[in-house]
Amino acid sequence: MEEQFILRVPPSIAERIDRLLSENASSSEDKSLDLVFSEDGRTGTFVIGNDRFPASLLDLPSVVESYKTYDDSALVKTADVGQMIMVREPGDASPDVVEYRHGLTPPMRDARKRRFRREPDLNPELVQRVEKDLVNIMSGGTVESLDAEGNGQGEAVDEDARNANKKAPTAPATKPEVPGTGGNAGEAYGSDSDDSDDSM
């Protein structure tokens, strides 16, 4: 797999990058592109020619797959892209969050709020108690909350739960007696065949 990222730049910078990539690099006034990050790994500087622009590394709300093709019919997956480098104009404010709230396309606008479920509000003490109980159960022990309630009551609850899970034996279903219908109902005798079915 290749290493890929998304570079989002303002329109003025996009024109300069397009000119640099389409022309011969020696004839363009913007001869160099560079991207330098600071020690935190989230903020940096994008350099094109002699101009410097602030940049930020942001996480996308969802993973984007990228593909390449050699024959315009078969696609080959090349990478999973989960981050974007956003270049800003020098006067623009720096984003204060690590995760970008929008996706790359218009349907993914405000994706985190509209498309994903909220994280549940869990009590940390409850989570720790449940983790401790699970570890006890996995090691062959019992849940502490049941032991604290008392053995007599806990055994009665366990016995009721065992009995509820058992299925009672069922008797085979019998066919209801259906009076004969049709033209033979008034006749005293049936057909001459011994293997005829009277139920029909």
Image: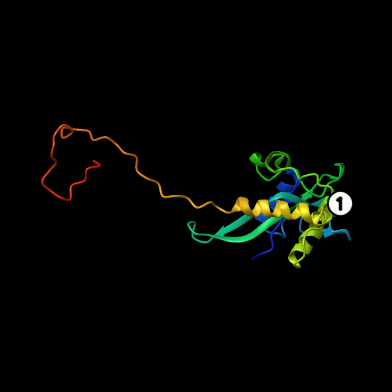
Q: State which quadrant residue 152 falls in.
A: bottom right
In this image, 160 relative to 170: left or right? right
Q: State which quadrant residue 134 falls in.
A: bottom right
The single residue placed furthest to the bottom in the displayed view is 139
The single residue placed furthest to the front in the displayed view is 188
The single residue placed furthest to the right in the displayed view is 39
> Residue 169: percent from the left, percent from the top?
50, 52
> Residue 171: percent from the left, percent from the top?
44, 50
> Residue 110: percent from the left, percent from the top?
72, 39
Q: State which quadrant residue 5 falls in.
A: bottom right
Q: Nearer the viewer, residue 103 or 160?
A: 160
In this image, 151 relative to 172: left or right? right
Numbered disc 1: secondary structure: helix
At x 76%, y 58%, the residue is 31
Q: Nearer the viewer, residue 13 or 162?
A: 162
Q: Is residue 187 above or below residue 95?
A: above
At x 77%, y 61%, the residue is 142
Q: Is residue 47 visible?
A: no
Quadrant of the rendering where the N terminus is positioned: bottom right
In this image, 166 relative to 63: left or right? left
Mark 1 Cα-neighbour bin, 10 Å: few <14, some 14–19, many ≥20: few
Task: Find disc 1 in the rendering and name its residue.
Answer: 125
In this image, 182 relative to 8: left or right? left
Q: Is residue 158 visible?
A: yes
Structure colour scheme: rainbow
Mark 1: which amino acid? Glu
Q: State how many labels appear.
A: 1
Q: Nearer the viewer, residue 148 or 76?
A: 148
> Residue 56: percent from the left, percent from the top?
82, 51
Quadrant of the rendering where the C terminus is positioned: top left
